Image (cartoon, helix red, strand yellow):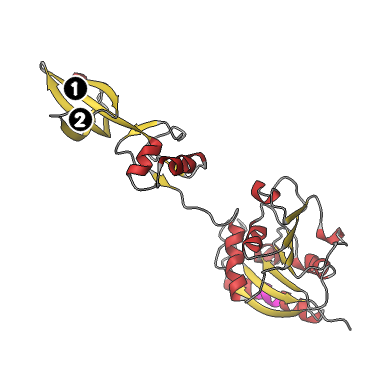
């Protein structure tokens, strides 16, 4: 076909007596996989490439109920066109057989929510109606998980700033506390039922005592123990990813001994079902603060 192809684009038109083909070469000799109808006229080959609005294509492919829903998917960034480098818009013209992918909807604003959701069930902790403290909130994965589990309020505390997801910033149940180290944080305006802790580059031996001071007797804490930040220097390989189960066991054992020596009760222990960002195995512990006396 090569130089004999005339690429005429039509949108939504119906042409009869045409031959449908999937692979033709354009006028530069480049083979493209597109929906193209070919006909012959006066000894020349004409290729008609049919186009359709992206929102209508989503409806036609059964990926959206109507064009309004389809447009919402596109504007929310949930639609991908693997074979098209353009940024999708509802009204953009695409090939009628274009490959369209709907991105999986994330349940939480970050992977932290997926981590915590598993252990809330595993630890059998009731969050509904609870006032919670999220230490090391960052983007807010734990905070989001707690809210979806029914928390009445979440204090999202972090040493950084500008990290909390905008959806959580606009949620009246979230109190955002930025640029604050829990070690120096001494007061909350109401009792905390449950604290969750996910910190990096800091040992839990420093963080947990500070959190316990904010809780009433028998207060509940869920901590994410990250061996890469608790292990001794000689135990951490180059790259920072600890794969040796013996090192995991040593780190956990040292933390358990530390807790027992301080009358801190470890009620439960679970390996996280979601690996750390670099592939590190992490562990959740359910801690109960000591009773008075």
Q: Position of residue 152 (x, y in %)?
A: 71, 63
In depth, the one of 215 and 264 nearer the eye is 215
Secondary structure, magenta segment, majority class: helix
Q: Residue furthest bottom?
A: 293
* Residue 179 in sight here: yes
Q: Quadrant of residue 127?
A: bottom right
Q: Position of residue 216 (x, y in %)?
A: 83, 74
In the picture provided, is 12 more to the left or to the right than 182? left
Answer few, some or many: residues within 10 Å of disc 1's Cα (few below 14, many 20 plus, some between 14 and 19): some
Vertical arrangement, residue 200 with respect to residue 273, above or below? above
- Residue holding disc 2: 37
* Residue 280 in sight here: no
Question: The magenta stretch spans which residues?
Answer: 250-254
Which mark, residue 150? Answer: none
Q: Residue shown at 69%/70% (left/top)?
A: 222
Vertical arrangement, residue 89 with respect to residue 229, above or below? above
Q: Quadrant of residue 239?
A: bottom right
């Amino acid at each position: 076909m090569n130089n004999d192809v005339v690429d005429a684009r039509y949108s939504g038109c119906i042409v009869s007596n045409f031959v449908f083909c999937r692979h033709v070469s354009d006028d530069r000799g480049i083979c493209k996989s597109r929906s193209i109808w070919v006909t012959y006229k006066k000894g020349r080959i004409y290729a008609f490439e049919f186009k359709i609005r992206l929102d209508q294509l989503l409806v036609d492919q059964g990926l959206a109920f109507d064009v309004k829903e389809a447009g919402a998917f596109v504007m929310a960034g949930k639609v991908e066109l693997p074979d098209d480098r353009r940024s999708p818009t509802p009204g953009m013209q695409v090939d009628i057989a274009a490959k369209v992918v709907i991105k999986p909807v994330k349940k939480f604003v970050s992977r932290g929510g997926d981590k915590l959701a598993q252990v809330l069930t595993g630890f059998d902790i009731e969050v509904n109606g609870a006032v919670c403290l999220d230490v090391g909130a960052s983007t807010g994965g734990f905070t989001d998980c707690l809210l979806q589990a029914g928390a009445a309020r979440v204090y999202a505390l972090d040493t950084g700033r500008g990290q909390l997801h905008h959806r959580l910033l606009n949620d009246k149940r979230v109190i955002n506390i930025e640029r604050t180290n829990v070690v120096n944080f001494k007061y909350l305006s109401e009792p905390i039922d449950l604290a969750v802790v996910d910190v990096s580059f800091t040992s839990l031996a420093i963080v947990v005592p500070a959190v316990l001071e904010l809780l009433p007797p028998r207060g509940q804490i869920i901590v994410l123990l990250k061996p890469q930040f608790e292990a001794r220097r000689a135990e951490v390989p180059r790259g920072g990813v600890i794969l040796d189960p013996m090192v995991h066991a040593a780190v956990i054992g040292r933390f358990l001994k530390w807790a027992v020596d301080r009358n801190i009760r470890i009620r439960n222990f679970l390996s996280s079902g979601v690996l750390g960002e670099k592939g590190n195995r992490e562990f959740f512990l359910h801690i109960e603060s000591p009773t008075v006396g």
